[in-house]
Image (spheres, rainbow, N blue to C red):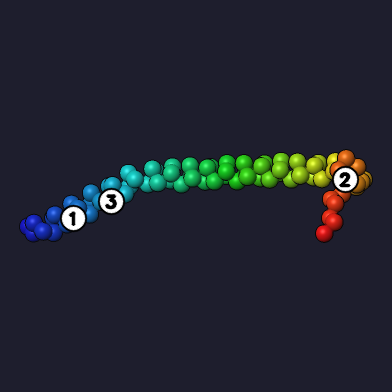
């Protein structure tokens, strides 16, 4: 009857069909992004835990030794 109305209706149906077919892909991408974000967050937590343990152990080994003057080097001679 009205060719322009039929054309718009066909475009709307094809867009709706596209969106209906695209939703599973969108959901899949969102799930993959969440998994990637969780993996990176976990890696960051593991790295921070490891680095803080390394820093604490380094601090503890250095703190157990008393501070002493280094006898191998003589003081500078400042005769000015």
Residue on which the image places disc 2: 74
Residue 22 placement (x, y as % from top left): 34, 45
SS for callout 3 = helix
Residue 34 numbered mark, or none: none
Image check: 66 left or right of 23? right
Q: Residue 1: name its quadrant.
A: bottom left
Residue 41 placement (x, y as % from top left): 60, 46
SS for callout 2 = loop
Residue 16 numbered mark, or none: 3
First-in-chain label (2 vs 1): 1
Q: Residue 64: name its quadrant.
A: top right
Residue at the spot 63% in from the left edge and 45% down from the top edge: 44
Q: Residue furthest front?
A: 80
* Res 12 visible: yes
Does 47 appear above or below 13? above
Residue 69 placement (x, y as % from top left): 91, 47
Residue at the spot 46% in from the left edge and 47% down from the top edge: 30
Q: CA distance from mark 2 to mark 1?
A: 94 Å
Asked if disc 3 and disc 2 are in contact, CB closer than 8 Å, the reply is no
Residue on which the image places disc 1: 9
């Amino acid at each position: 009857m009205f060719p322009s109305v039929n054309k718009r209706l066909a475009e709307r149906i094809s867009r709706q069909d596209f969106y209906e077919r695209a939703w599973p892909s969108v959901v899949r991408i969102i799930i993959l992004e969440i998994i990637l974000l969780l993996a990176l967050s976990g890696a960051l937590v593991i790295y921070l835990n490891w680095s803080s343990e390394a820093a604490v152990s380094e601090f503890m080994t250095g703190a157990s030794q008393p501070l002493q003057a280094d006898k191998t080097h003589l003081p500078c001679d400042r005769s000015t």
